[in-house]
Image (tube, rainbow, N blue to C red):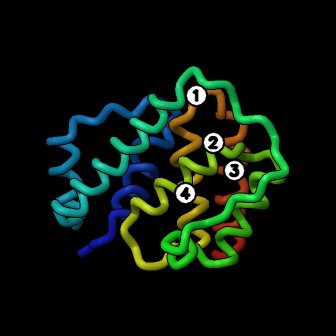
Amino acid sequence: MKENVFDVLMYLFENYMDEGTEFHPDQEALTHELTQAGFHRGEIRKAFSWLDGLSSLRENNAGKPPAARSAAIRHYAPKEQERLDEECRGYLHFMEASGVIDPATREVIVDRLMALETDEIALDQIKWVMLLVLFNQPGQEHVYYMLEDMVFDEMQGHLH
């Protein structure tokens, strides 16, 4: 049995979202398919809720201009520090400093990471959540494809 919200999200991403089309599922049919694939209904509901939260964040940020570059450093709350280790926080900082993500996108990523309800968040999870967030942000296609190539290249490197 697969029991992790993150696993449900990855299944959805790999089977539906990565097709380059807008993701508007029939939740009842999708729930049935996910149950048949071995996921618990509770985790499926949490994954749908996670995606709804991402959609809400996207709608709230729609029409806002991209955040200006800043020399400010993001300070993580104690609860965030517990779940995002130094390597993970460093990766987010690197992606922002490199111009891959802006501060607003970073905040959406952190919000969605915290919504995963896992004790500790791995670097691979950050990369996948970043892909999910960028996939759902209009105008970020070039960044999404660049990051997608990086993530899949790293996966291929681990397989060989």
Whole-angstrom CA distance, mark 4 to mark 2, is 10 Å
- Are there few (<14), some (14-19), or many (20+) residues within 10 Å of tag 3? some
Contact between marks 1 and 4 (CB within 8 A): the answer is no
Q: CA distance from mark 1 to mark 3?
A: 15 Å
Against 138, residue 154 (above or below) is below
Q: Which residue lies under the disc numbered 2?
A: 104
- The disc placed on residue 110 is 4
Please identify the quarter of the rendering in which residue 6 is found. Answer: bottom left
Is residue 97 visible in the rendered structure shown here?
yes
**In x, y percent, where is residue 4?**
33, 70
How far, Cα to Cα, is label 3 from label 4? Answer: 17 Å
Q: Mark 3 — residue?
A: 147
Q: Residue at x 49, y 61 (%)?
A: 113
Say what secondary structure mark 2 lies in.
helix
**Which of disc 4 and disc 3 is earlier in sequence?**
4
Q: Tell me which numbered mark, 1 or 2, is placed earlier along the sequence.
A: 2
- Residue with the mark numbered 1: 138
**In this rendering, the label closer to the viewer, 1 or 3:** 1
Identified by mark 4, the residue type is: Val
Q: Are marks 3 and 4 in contact (CB under 8 Å)?
A: no
Query: Which numbered disc flags the more N-terminal residue, 4 or 2?
Result: 2
